[in-house]
Structure formats: C-alpha cells, structure tokens
Image (spheres, helix red, strand yellow):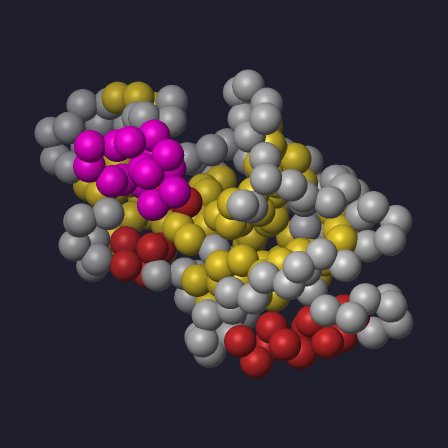
C-alpha cells in the first residue's frame, strides 16, 4: 500500500464522504484510501495552466451587449452579445451557454461548487473512485471523465471506461456523490473531471457539445 495522502477539506460534505469510503472498503481487503484530492474549479485550473491574462471560464458566458460573435481561448465559438465569464465578474451575473441559453444560475453559484475525490488502487489494477460534492445545481446532471494530459490534443474518456456508471444527478440540496471503478489506476498524467450537462442528460462516452450542452465545472489533477 502506498503512502496515504489526506487532504479532505472541512466542508459539510465530509461526513458523507466518510460514510461512502467506509462502505466502499467493506470486503475489499484494503485498509485505507491511498489518495484524497480536493476539486478546484476548471476555470481556475484552465486559466493558470494557459496563463490567461485575465482568469476566465472558457465554457460559460455572460451577457455583453455589443460584443461580436467570437471564438474563445478553448476554441469554443459563442454568439454575439456574450463573452467568456471572468473570475473577477460580479458573482450575481447570470451565466449562459455559448449559444446564449441561460444555465439557470449565476456565476457565484457556478464557481462555488466544491468536492473531494478518493482514489483507491485495487489488486486487479483497477481504481476505486469515490467523489462527493457540495454546491452543485440542484437536480443537475453530471458525469465524471478522465483527462489524458499525455495525449495531444488532451484526450477525454469516461472515468468508468464505458460511459455507463460515471453519471449522477445532484440532490435538491446541491450535494452529490458517486462511486465507480476506473478500468486502470490513474497517474500524474490524469485528472478527474466533472462535466455539467446543461441539456439535463449525459452523453455516454461523449462529454457532449463543449460550451453548448457540456461544461467543465470541477477538476482534480493528480500530482
């Protein structure tokens, strides 16, 4: 068993996390999780990794009267009258898809989601994954995907390998939890990605149309 990394935040979701973790260990022969990572907003991660002069979210938008249709920093084309949301924008601004469709919440709510993910390699070479969240859109549809940073361009696959067990719906209180098994253990070239589906449904092995029906909300990059 490798060294234990414990980085669970002291958030309201922590008790739920411990219940899920205990249940997941039952009968596995594993004594403890090997790694627990906090999620951060994909917007902050993307802005830092791509050295954006003004930190922004490449996949959600705010109204900007007079702004022309354009292609954003992640190659997402948006309609006129909108621009990419900046992390410094007012938290009360409503957010929209690249097509100008209201997502049903404001920027503060979008950027306020939090969570933790527990990764436990199994003797078979797979990985048990437990993720818990707070501050999601109540009743929102979400999926977990795996980033492959060793691929050019960066690749994305369903975290369960099939696009079947990687989906969940947030509760009325905005909390969510999911347990699944990844086909292979994750490494430093991977991340766990949380995709919000603004059309209300997952898309199997596909994330959906990025910026239009699918939006990266949270990410946890492995060290």
Region rendered in magenta: 44-60
Quarter that holds the C terminus: top right
Q: Is residue 82 covered in magenta?
A: no
Q: Is residue 121 above or below residue 148?
A: below
Q: Position of residue 167 (x, y in %)?
A: 65, 52
Q: Position of residue 26 (x, y in %)?
A: 83, 74
> Between 124 and 60, which is closer to the camera in this rendering?
124
Quarter that holds the N terminus: bottom right
Q: Is residue 109 above or below residue 211?
A: below
Q: Residue lying furthest front in this view?
A: 3
Residue 51 in view here: yes
Residue at (78, 70) in percent of width and height:
31
Residue at (32, 37) in percent of width and height:
47
Q: Residue lying furthest left in this view?
A: 66
Q: Is residue 49 covered in magenta?
A: yes
- Position of 80 compared to 153: left or right? left
> Between 184 and 168, which is closer to the camera in this rendering?
184
- Position of 199 compared to 4: left or right? left
Using the rendered view, name the quadrant where residue 73 is placed: top left
Residue at (65, 35) in percent of width and height:
157
Residue 99 in view here: no
- Position of 83 compared to 142: left or right? left
> Between 4 and 133, which is closer to the camera in this rendering?
4
Q: Position of residue 172 (x, y in %)?
A: 50, 72
Q: Position of residue 219 (x, y in %)?
A: 49, 48
Residue at (51, 65) in percent of width and height:
7
């Amino acid at each position: 068993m490798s060294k234990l990394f414990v980085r669970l935040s002291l958030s309201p979701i922590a008790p739920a996390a411990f219940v899920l973790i205990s249940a997941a260990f039952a009968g596995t022969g594993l004594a403890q999780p090997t790694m627990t990572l906090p999620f951060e907003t994909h917007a902050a991660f993307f802005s830092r990794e791509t050295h954006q002069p003004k930190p922004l979210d490449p996949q959600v938008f705010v109204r900007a009267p007079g702004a022309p249709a354009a292609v954003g920093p992640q190659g997402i084309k948006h309609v006129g009258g909108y621009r990419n949301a900046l992390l410094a924008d007012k938290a009360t601004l409503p957010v929209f898809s690249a097509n100008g469709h209201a997502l049903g919440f404001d920027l503060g709510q979008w950027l306020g989601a939090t969570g933790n993910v527990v990764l436990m390699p199994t003797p078979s070479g797979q990985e048990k994954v437990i993720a818990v969240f707070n501050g999601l859109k109540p009743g929102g549809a979400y999926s977990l995907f795996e980033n492959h940073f060793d691929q050019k361009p960066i690749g994305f696959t369903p975290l369960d390998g099939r696009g079947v067990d990687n989906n969940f719906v947030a509760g009325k209180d905005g909390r969510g939890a999911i347990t699944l098994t990844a086909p292979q253990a994750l490494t430093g070239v991977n991340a766990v990605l949380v995709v919000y589906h603004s059309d209300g449904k997952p898309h199997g092995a596909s994330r959906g149309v990025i910026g239009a029906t699918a939006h990266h909300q949270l990410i946890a990059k492995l060290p």
